[in-house]
Amino acid sequence: MIENIVELIKKYDTIIIHRHKKPDGDALGSQIGLKNIILDNFEGKTVYVVGDHAGRYAFMDGSEMDEIADECYNGALAFVLDTSAKSLISDDRYTLADATVRMDHHIFVEKICDTELTDTSYESCCGLITDFADRAGLKLSSASAKALYTGMVTDSGRFRYDSTTSNTHRLASILMKEDFSTADIYRGLYSDGFENVRMRAQFVMKIEFTEAGVAYIYTTKDEVKALGVDTFTISRGMVGTMSEIKGVDIWANFTETEEGILCELRSSMYNINRIAVKYGGGGHEKASGATLKSRDEVDAMLNDLDAIIKENA
C-alpha cells in the first residue's frame, strides 16, 4: 500500500489535500505535514491544502488554507486525511479528482477513496503519516516534523492517553531529530488568555451528572452567542473540563448550533464509539463525536451511555 501511494504521488503533478471539518491539531498537522513531505521529496509538484478555517489552531505554521477553483481537480490526485466518514470531510470536491487516497487512524465507517490506508493502531493520523514517510524512505524537514509532532501531541493528550504506545514514542523520536521548538508548540497549544481561563471555570460550574454517573455539559445557542466564541472552542475545547473528575468514566459535551447539537464523547474505560456511530458519528473507541438532531436525542444518548456503565457495574 505504501508503494502504491508513493507511485500515485509520483504520477500526479497537482495534489490536493483534504481533512475533516472543524479541524483539530491532528487534522491540520497531518495535512500540513504531508504537504511538506511531498514538496520536499518530489520535484515539480503543486500541492494545495483545502478546508474550513483552522480556528484555534491558526497558530500552526502553514495552517492558512488555499482557495482553489474546481478546475484544479482536473487530472489531480486528492488526499483525504484523518476522516472516517464522507459527511465529515471539509470540501467535498475531492470527488472531482482523477484519483483519491485516504489515510486515517479512526475506526472504519465507510469506504471513501480509491486507495485507502487506515490503521487504528496509531494514536494519530500524524503518527500514521510519519511512519509512512519513514517506511517509504522520505526525508522530513523542520516544517513537516513540527506539524506532525503537533498532531501527535494533541491526539495523544500529550502522550497520556492509552492510545500511546512504544511506536508512538519511536515516531516522535524520529520527528524530534529535525530542528523545531517543542516549546513553541506547547505555547501555542496550552497558553491561554484570562478570558478563556474564566470561561473554563464557568463550564466547570455547568457540569451535570446522570443517574449512572455520566458527566455532561449542555450549552444552548443563546449561551453560545453570549460567550462570543466559536463553537469549536466550546464543543471540542470544553469537553476536557470533565476529564479528571474522580469516579467519572464517561463524559459528554453537547453544544447547540444551527446545524444541530454537536456532541463530543469521551471515556477513560469504555468503548463509546458504538454510541457515536448509532447517532451518525464516529471516531475512536474512547473519543468520538456526533451531531444530534434534538434534545430528545441527547436524552436518548445519555441513556445509552448510562447503559454502558450499568452493563459493566
Image (spheres, rainbow, N blue to C red):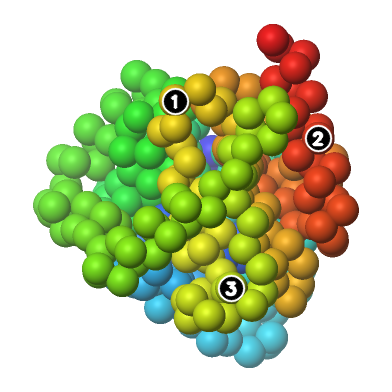
| Quarter the C terminus occupies | top right
The residue that appears at 63% across and 22% down in the rendered structure is 270
Q: How far apart are marks 3 and 1 (CA)?
A: 27 Å
Q: Which amino acid does label 2 sit on?
A: Asn
What residue would you read off at disc 3?
223
The residue that appears at 43% across and 60% down in the rendered structure is 202
Q: Distance between the residues labelled 2 and 3?
A: 24 Å
Front-most of residues 117 and 216: 216
The residue that appears at 22% across and 33% down in the rendered structure is 173
What residue would you read off at disc 1?
246
Of labels 2 and 3, earlier in sequence is 3
**Corner quadrant of residue 222:** bottom right
The residue that appears at 30% across and 61% down in the rendered structure is 197
Q: What residue type is labelled 1?
A: Lys
Marker disc for residue 303: 2
Check disc 2: other Cα within 10 Å, few if <14, some if 14-19, many if 20+: some
Local secondary structure at mark 1:
loop
